[in-house]
Amino acid sequence: NVTAAKFAIAASSFEKARSYIDAGMNLLEPQHWEKQYSLCLQLHEMSASVSYMHGDVRNMSIALNEIMDNVKSFEDGLRSSSLLVKLLASSAQYKEAMSNCLAVLSNLGEEISTDVSLPIVRSELSVIQTTLANISVEQVQRLPRMTDKSKLNAMQFLSMLCMYSLISKPMLLPLFSCRMVRMTIEYGFCDASIVGLSTAAFGLFTFTDDILLGYRIGKVCDSLIDESPNRHALRSRLCRELDCSLKVTVEPNRTVVPLFIDRYNSAMMTGDVESAMLC
């Protein structure tokens, strides 16, 4: 049932996934968290994830509470921590969502100060301007893949911080995106690196007058997205940063407007209702 649910989720068939997950839970033994820990964790994580895609806050909360009560380690709880952040954000509790992300990042060894001012933002972006002045797709592709699990997890939580700071405290966005760019250069490339580069481009567009560099970085990100197996999730996730700001400003409207339907469809295919509403 776990394998069938995974295939159903990958095929965006979330109703079928729910039926497989429920069937799997009904087959669990008594005292299943002690006897079938790994299986229980997978089933409850998938249950919370599918509930989120359906907007079923009640069942999502039940699944997450069950995980939190039984998880054995910080690492085992990272997936549920990310889902809890999404649950908080879905209820417009952005401050709490961001606090949870920052706490997880601290445990992962990534301390980030949220004391921010315009001079600090411009100083961060000045470094990015120098670092990415000659960026190209080939340059990024030559980077090694990021393999450090701790850094990969940190990049995922930084990606969520970028999303929610854009809504609740935009001045923090360059701090998070610049950290992601530095981690990519130091530890290697991953899909979340595209989020970091895209939000850094958006930061240049918003807080400096270097719109053309921001646009060029955005075009590099477009090419990287096209080559990613997770292209649908990335296209919808980065619609605001790339399409609604940089492209709308630089490109003719007739070429940009049709993109929003495509981004909406990509979001719905991946169950990303949050991004679909913003496309």
Image (cartoon, helix red, strand yellow):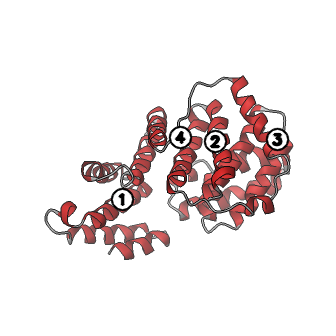
Q: Quadrant of the N terminus?
A: bottom left
Whichever of labels 3 and 4 marks the residue nearer the N terminus, that label is 4
Q: Pointer 4: residues within 10 angstroms few (<14), some, or many (20+)?
A: some
- Label of residue 45 in the image: 1
Q: Position of residue 182 (x, y in %)?
A: 67, 45
| Furthest residue toward left | 30
Q: Is residue 130 left or right of residue 96?
A: right
Q: Amino acid at mark 2?
A: Arg
Comparing marks 3 and 1, which lies closer to the viewer?
3
Q: CA distance from mark 1 to mark 4?
A: 25 Å
The answer to whether residue 240 is seen in the rendering is no
Badge 3 marks a residue whose secondary structure is helix
Q: Amino acid at mark 3?
A: Thr
- Label of residue 171 in the image: none
Residue linked to disc 2: 179
Badge 4 marks a residue whose secondary structure is loop
Whichever of labels 3 and 1 marks the residue nearer the N terminus, that label is 1
Q: Amino acid at mark 1?
A: Glu
Q: Amino acid at mark 4?
A: Glu
